Image (cartoon, helix red, strand yellow):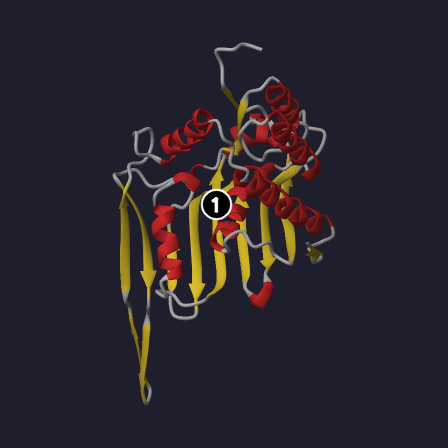
């Protein structure tokens, strides 16, 4: 292995990625891995085992995990602004169109067998886990609403999928991901005293600020008059979108690079990758059973 390369970024299709993650780790290279990291839990476990054995850093490429907005969101979730979290919703989709369906690698079951669930749902599930401070759900359910494939694909892949996560204390989370509905990437956290809404939780809207909205709507009734008072507060964080040095994508590689140069590995990144893969595969197993509840 070359001694002038410390780390590698592996964006290969999921169907062939695991072999190269393991080879990179065995060669002593730190690994930035695209998501979904494996086609199943066993592959992801094998990748992490190889990295742990070699003493190299593993991190998946979820950009929003490195946005400064997350720090502000966590503060809002814990300072009483919305009370106790009871429900989490999110949606991430884009309409790829006919050319996408007929030619993109994400429509080939040998290359990207998890379809929209792996490509988009990974972000939904990660946001749910992050909101719950990485507590695992006790059970999940999932439904493949629609499947499709390009002409040379052996099988269909999910192109529209929804899932439900069930936590202790009756907290629930739902998500929707799709290759066939319009651009959306919102997340909504409902608490006992208010709500939190992020309209662009995956890729921030173009600009110099990353924002979210805290709502504490008041309802006042006098006889038959029902007055709903909108009480919104916008929280913004100075952080540019796209390729700016302060963007979350730049932060991702900066944070990864800092770990590589520190000489010490942080196991949390592999742990949350494995959690995400476990939840995702349980949702897919549920979908294969027509939405039956799968225990974790």
In this view, 145 is above or below 4: below
Q: Quadrant of the N terminus?
A: top right
Percent x, y for residue 244? 30, 30
Percent x, y for residue 155? 71, 33
Asked whether 217 or 247 is in front, the reply is 247
Q: Residue reaching furthest front?
A: 263
Helix, strand or loop at disc 1?
A: strand
Judging by the rendered image, the residue that carries numbered circle 1 is: 92
Residue 207 sits in quarter = top left
Percent x, y for residue 112? 62, 31
Q: Residue at (33%, 68%) from the top-left corner?
A: 216
Q: Residue reaching furthest bottom?
A: 223
Percent x, y for residue 282? 67, 48
In this view, 257 is above or below 161: above
Q: Residues within 10 Å of mark 1 (few under 14, many from 20)?
A: many
In this view, 241 is above or below 26: below
Residue 271 sits in quarter = top right
Q: Quadrant of the C terminus?
A: bottom right
Count of labels shown?
Answer: 1
Q: Residue at (66%, 44%) from the top-left corner?
A: 281
Residue 106 sits in quarter = top right
User: Is 122 positioned to the left or the right of 243 in the image?
Assistant: right
In this view, 147 is above or below 167: above
């Amino acid at each position: 292995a070359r001694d002038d390369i410390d780390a590698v970024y592996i964006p290969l299709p999921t169907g062939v990625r695991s072999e190269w993650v393991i080879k990179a780790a065995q060669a002593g290279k730190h690994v930035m891995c695209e998501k979904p990291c494996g086609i199943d839990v066993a592959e992801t476990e094998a990748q992490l085992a190889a990295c742990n054995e070699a003493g190299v850093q593993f991190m998946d490429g979820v950009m929003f995990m490195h946005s400064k907005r997350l720090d502000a969101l966590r503060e809002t979730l814990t300072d009483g602004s919305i009370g106790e979290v009871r429900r989490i919703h999110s949606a991430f989709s884009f309409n790829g169109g006919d050319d996408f369906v007929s030619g993109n690698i994400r429509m080939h079951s040998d290359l990207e067998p998890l379809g929209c669930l792996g490509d988009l749902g990974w972000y939904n599930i990660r946001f749910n886990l992050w909101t719950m401070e990485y507590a695992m759900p006790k059970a999940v359910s999932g439904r493949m609403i629609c499947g499709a494939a390009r002409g040379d694909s052996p099988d269909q892949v999910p192109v529209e999928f929804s899932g439900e996560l069930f936590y202790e204390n009756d907290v629930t989370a739902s998500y929707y991901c799709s290759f066939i509905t319009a651009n959306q990437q919102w997340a909504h956290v409902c608490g006992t005293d208010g709500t939190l809404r992020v309209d662009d939780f995956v890729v921030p809207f173009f600009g110099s600020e990353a924002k979210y909205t805290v709502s504490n709507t008041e309802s006042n009734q006098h006889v038959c008059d029902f007055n709903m008072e909108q009480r919104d507060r916008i929280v913004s964080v100075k952080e540019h979108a796209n390729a700016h040095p302060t963007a979350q994508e730049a932060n991702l590689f900066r944070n990864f690079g800092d770990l590589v140069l520190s000489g010490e590995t942080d196991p949390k990144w592999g742990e949350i990758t494995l959690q995400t893969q476990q939840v995702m595969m349980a949702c897919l197993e549920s979908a294969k059973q027509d939405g039956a509840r799968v225990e974790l």
